[in-house]
Amino acid sequence: MTAFDATKLLSARTSAVEEAAIIRMAQKARDLKTKGHDVVSLTLGEPDFDTPAFIQAAATQAMAQGFTHYAPVQGVPELRAALSEKLARENGLHYSAEEIAISNGAKQAITNAVYALIDEGDEVILLSPFWVAYEGIVRMAGGVPVQLHAGADEGFKVPASRIAAAITPKTKLIMLNSPNNPTGAVFTKAELEAIAAVVAQHPRLMLLSDEIYEYILFEGEMTSFGSLPGMRERTITINGFSKAYAMTGWRLGYAAAPLPVAKAMAKVQSTFTAGANAFVQRAAIAALKEGQADATAMRESYRKRRDLIIGALKAIPGVRIENPPGTFYAFPDVSAFLGKRAGNHTLGTVDELCDWLLDTHGLACVPGSAFGDPNCLRLSFASSQADIIKGTDRLARALIDLI
């Protein structure tokens, strides 16, 4: 009898989505550490701060008060009201509480939005470099990702003219992330206004604005796309609590969108999961009310780490890097080293370079190809200064050895 092979039963949509390189490299680093190897991991975009104590206390108090049951799928009214006030005060976004949907992390908010809008064959424009999850989510929903790339020479920002040229009758959504993961790039208000002018010309088109890194901004000003004239009804704004308040493990995100879209997103969420954790939502209210001092302190710590890692990278001959104005990622162009040899092995791609850095030099980072850029690699500086120094030292020694 032929052995049963479950892989033959996997859906086409599942098979079409590759394992995220971030997860692969982080797991490989953990496996090597478990075996006793000395590994510095600069892979995950996870703050090394613990969640502020007052947020933890708010969650504990909420549990003691009985907030341990199912929460409404769209989120508790008090949190949605607090977010409505926050968005109006800080972002110039005026959405009622009914137009805000709470989710189990910002990634679920993005997934909800894509499933709420995208039908089989609809095109979604991805501005590359982009967060790795975008493409997989679009493919899972049956959409067609259309990648538009901007390299280091353009500040990693795709201009509006190129977006306009890529729009077809099948285009339904643009996904924009500013401040950007992995590059740290921040679109200026003028650049966003130019994109808004393009969106306004296409009545079937919406834009998803991922603003999860809004508080980790070192230079420039934060402009929410939906605050631009005429864009409120054309925008789904995504945000969450993971990055600003070091709440990655709490899994809480949210979206603000026109009422029909917000309701559709809640319907998607009720199909796949349920309402976000009830006592975490109460803790999030506390974060919004009292967390700005902690968010600011963490940002200033990231600023020091950015200056440290960028200085170290600029000192490596052949590495191209500018100061990222936001997020906690460095995205150096290492194309000068591709095609060089390490012993008898030629490192022809950035993926091979990253595997070699981990296997031979104990440095874990993520290949830029995972984000749509085959010339770069991503280093997270949401890590200790000691790890940043050790990691960049290993990178420098490794690259100098290539011939």
Image: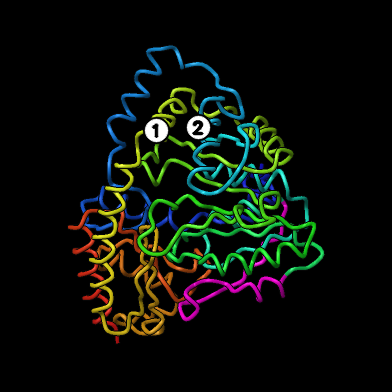
Disc 2 is placed on an element classified as helix
> Could you say which quadrant of the image residue 388 lies in?
bottom left
- Percent across and percent down for residue 250 are 42, 34
**Does the residue at mark 1 contact the one at mark 2 (Cβ under 8 Å)?**
yes
* Magenta part of the chain: 142-166
- Percent across and percent down for residue 215 are 40, 51
| Residue at the far bottom in the pictured view | 403
Asked if the magenta segment contains residue 157, the reply would be yes
- Which residue: 62% across, 51% down? 137
Colour basis: rainbow
- Check the picture and name the quadrant holding the N terminus: top right
* Residue that mark 2 sits on: 82
Relative horizontal placement of residue 265, taking residue 169 as reference (left or right)? left
Mark 1, other Cα within 10 Å: few <14 / some 14–19 / many ≥20: few
- Percent across and percent down for residue 360 are 27, 68
Relative horizontal placement of residue 20, taking residue 226 as reference (left or right)? left
Amino acid type assigned to the residue bearing label 1 in the image: Lys
> Could you say which quadrant of the image residue 353 lies in?
bottom left
* Residue that mark 1 sits on: 289
In primary-sequence order, the first of circles 1 and 2 is 2
Amino acid type assigned to the residue bearing label 2 in the image: Ala
